[in-house]
Every structure is written in structure tokens, then in C-alpha cells.
Image (tube, rainbow, N blue to C red):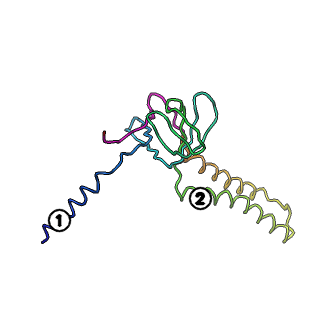
Amino acid sequence: MQIRIYIVISLWLFFSGINCYGQRFIAMDVSKVTGFKRIKYYIGDDIRYKTVETNKRYKGNIVALSDSLIFFENKTVVNIKDIKVVYRDNANFVTRGLARFCFVFGPGFLGLDTFNNLINKRKPIINDLAVQEGAAFIGAGLILDNMMKRRYKIGKRRSIKIMDLDLK
């Protein structure tokens, strides 16, 4: 009885997998001294890039991929060979949350210290040490925000291509 169940399940899995479609994605290969890394962008992902013709940054949601073209949500079509730079945000919820905390805590600390000095009638109202500490927190937030953004210039060591895993 168990053998019949295994045969039925395996035949069902075999025949249900026949109508599967291949997958297309953008593969950005980054080779370093220490090794090789492949970054993948699928349909539905957001990508930020800069083209060869214009020196402007573009951002778009990938809708479809062909052999050498990328179709975006705002009806923009870009050839894969026209992409000069790809920008990637490697931040996670910890670094993003810590950066936001620092952005809010820096001016908040300065405002709280100034308000406390106003209530207690202390001189000077704006303390130099509080300004330095607030500026340090804002600087830490800026550093955390920019530290996780990577810029990949397409060239010899970094290539970008469209991979098609279709069964033809």
C-alpha cells in the first residue's frame, strides 16, 4: 500500500512540473581579489542605475526582461550595454534603524538641552558641548546611512548580463 502511495505522489510531482517556465534575471558579477560574488535582480525588484548617454541616476521597478533589454514600470526601456553604474543598498533593518535614531536623537538632544537651560535660566542657553554631541549623532547617522550604499561601476571586473534559464 505504501509503495502505491509513493508511486502516485512521485507521478503527480513529475507531471505537475512539466508546465514550469524558465526564469530570467539580471546577474551582476563582481570579482574581487578574495573571490567572486553574483548579485541577482529579479522581475519586481527595484534597481538604481546610471546610463552611458546621460549622467543622471535612474530608479525603476523591473517589469520584464528580454535578451538584452530591461523594461521598467514607468515604460522605460534600457539596453543592458547602456548601463554604466549600478547602485545597491545593502542596509538591513538594524543599520537603517540606527541611522534614523541618530538623525532624530542629535537634534532632539540639542533641543532638550536648550529647553532645559531655558527653564532653569542657565547661561549660556545653547551649550557648546550639547551642540558638539548633537552634531556627532547627526554625523554618525550620515556615516551609517552612506556606509551601506555601494556603487558598482560596470567594467572589466564587474559585468552585468541577463540570464535566461529557459528549457529550450
Quadrant, the N terminus: bottom left
Residue 131 is a magenta residue: no
Most foreground residue, 52 or 168: 168
Most foreground residue, 113 or 18: 18
Disc number placed over residue 98 in the picture, else none: 2
Q: Give x and y (percent) for residue 31.
A: 41, 35
Most foreground residue, 144 or 28: 28
Q: CA distance from mark 2 to mark 1?
A: 52 Å
Looking at the picture, which amino acid does disc 2 mark?
Leu
> Mark 2 or 1, which is nearer the eye?
1
Question: Which residue is under mark 1?
Answer: 6
Number of numbered discs present? 2
Task: Tell me which segment is drawn in magenta.
Answer: 151-167
Q: Which of the two discs, 2 and 1, labels the residue nearer the N terminus? A: 1
Q: Give x and y (percent) for residue 70.
A: 51, 38
- Which residue lies at the image location 63% right of the left edge and 58% below the top edge? 100
Residue 153 is a magenta residue: yes
Most foreground residue, 128 or 72: 72
Looking at the picture, which amino acid does disc 1 mark?
Tyr
- Which residue lies at the image location 59% right of the left edge and 58% below the top edge? 98
